[in-house]
Image (cartoon, grey):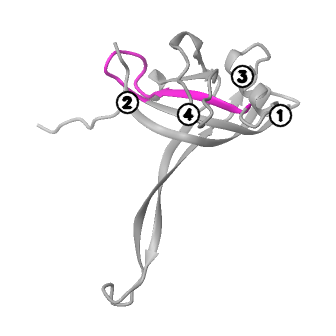
Amino acid sequence: MPQAPKYRFGKNALIRVAAIATIAADGTVTKPATAAFKVLCLAKDTTFGLENGTVDIENFCTGGRTVSVRDGTQSGTMELGETTWAEDDDVLSLMEDAAFSEDEQGGWLYVEILPLGAGTGKPVFDLIIDVNTWSMSIPSKGVITVEHGLTVIEGPIRGTVAA
């Protein structure tokens, strides 16, 4: 008998965002308390991931060919799709404040992405992001949306939801 393919629906996912309260002198960020996180529910989609850095090597052992090998660096990425704007949304207010902040680290936010939703043992990915750009689109017909240009400072860091 054929087996059904495995899949997961994105509708169960949670994206939670919190302001960063503590940054140590060495740049270490303390994860905010669970109660500080607010749910982002107005984004159409979210994409995040990482890219491993490489260095090209060309020598006698490679026969003169160029071979790319990992150099040990990783860069995280995160993009929010079209996001419906509401003036009293907690997360959008945090992101707007972060974008308009003039402090060196004022645009940093802590993000938790739970692709299967909340629950003990489910996967979670933590990121520290900087909100570099913010723009609002006001159509003559339709809803107001905002876009955010994000830079990942740290992460994604894989984990599981604790009890």
Q: Earlier in the sequence, mark 3 or mark 1?
A: 3
Pointer 2 local density, CA inside 10 Å: few below 14, some 14–19, many at least 20? few
- Left or right of residue 68, residue 92 in this image: right
Q: Mark 4 or mark 1, which is nearer to you? A: 4
Distance CA(mark 2)–CA(mark 3): 24 Å
Segment tinted magenta in the rendering? 106-124
Instruction: Kindly report the distance in space between the C-alpha atoms of the residues bearing marks 3 and 1.
Output: 14 Å
- Residue labelled with disc 3: 94
Q: Quadrant of residue 63?
A: bottom left
Q: Nearer the viewer, mark 3 or mark 1?
A: 1
Q: Specify which label sits upstream in the sequence, 2 or 1.
A: 1
Mark 4 — residue?
28
Q: Position of residue 57 (x, y in %)?
A: 42, 78
x%, y% of residue 55? 47, 70
Point 48% across, 48% down: residue = 50
Q: Nearer the viewer, mark 2 or mark 4?
A: 4
Nearer the observer, 87 or 84: 87
* Mark 3: secondary structure: helix
Q: Is residue 72 magenta?
A: no
Q: On residue 159, which mark appears?
A: 2
